[in-house]
Image (tube, grey):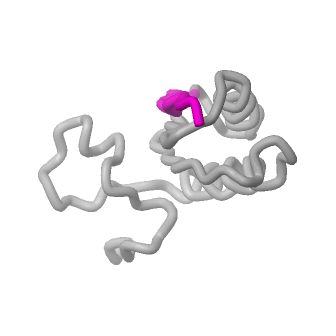
Amino acid sequence: MTPAAPTDPTRTAESPADAAGEAEGAVPVRSEDDRLIIAKVSTGLAADTQLTVFRFQVECRGGVVTLRGPAPSAAVRARAEEIARNVQGVTSVVNRLDVRAG
């Protein structure tokens, strides 16, 4: 398997693999299912009229989706999590969206 390019949406600077203690610089292995989940969650977030102007980082490993980035309100944070949870194949959501008053 070829390492993901830095622009690959399935590869992030800080991934669950990093948190799990994998070697620095190692490319985490993502299944086709995880890549599909990332695409579906990202598409769902972009399609939602409440969220379309926001850019969230979406990661997935083993069906566990992690959302990261700033959110302007608790309602936006909750809506993003709801969309992610409703994607087929998602087993759980780790919501690390940071609510910041703007």
Name which residue lies at 86% across and 47% down. Answer: 49
Q: Quadrant of residue 80?
A: top right
Residue 74 part of the magenta-drawn span: no
Name which residue lies at 32% across and 73% down. Answer: 3
Name which residue lies at 52% across and 40% down. Answer: 70
> Split into 4 quadrants, where in the image is the N terminus?
bottom left
> Split into 4 quadrants, where in the image is the C terminus?
top right
Name which residue lies at 17% across and 61% down. Answer: 25
64 and 6: which is toward the camera: 6
Q: In the displayed structure, would residue 61 be above or below residue 64?
A: below
Residue 95 part of the magenta-drawn span: yes
Image-based side of 8 in relation to 44, left or right: left
Residue most extreme to the front: 102
Residue most extreme to the right: 49
Q: Position of residue 97 (x, y in %)?
A: 52, 33
Q: Give the range drawn in magenta.
A: 93-102
Q: Where is residue 32 in the image (x, y as percent from the top left)?
A: 55, 59
Per the picture, the main secondary structure of the magenta-coloured stretch is: strand
Image-based side of 52 in relation to 71, left or right: right
Q: Position of residue 44 (x, y in %)?
A: 77, 49
Q: In the displayed structure, would residue 46 be above or below residue 4?
A: above
75 and 79: which is toward the camera: 75
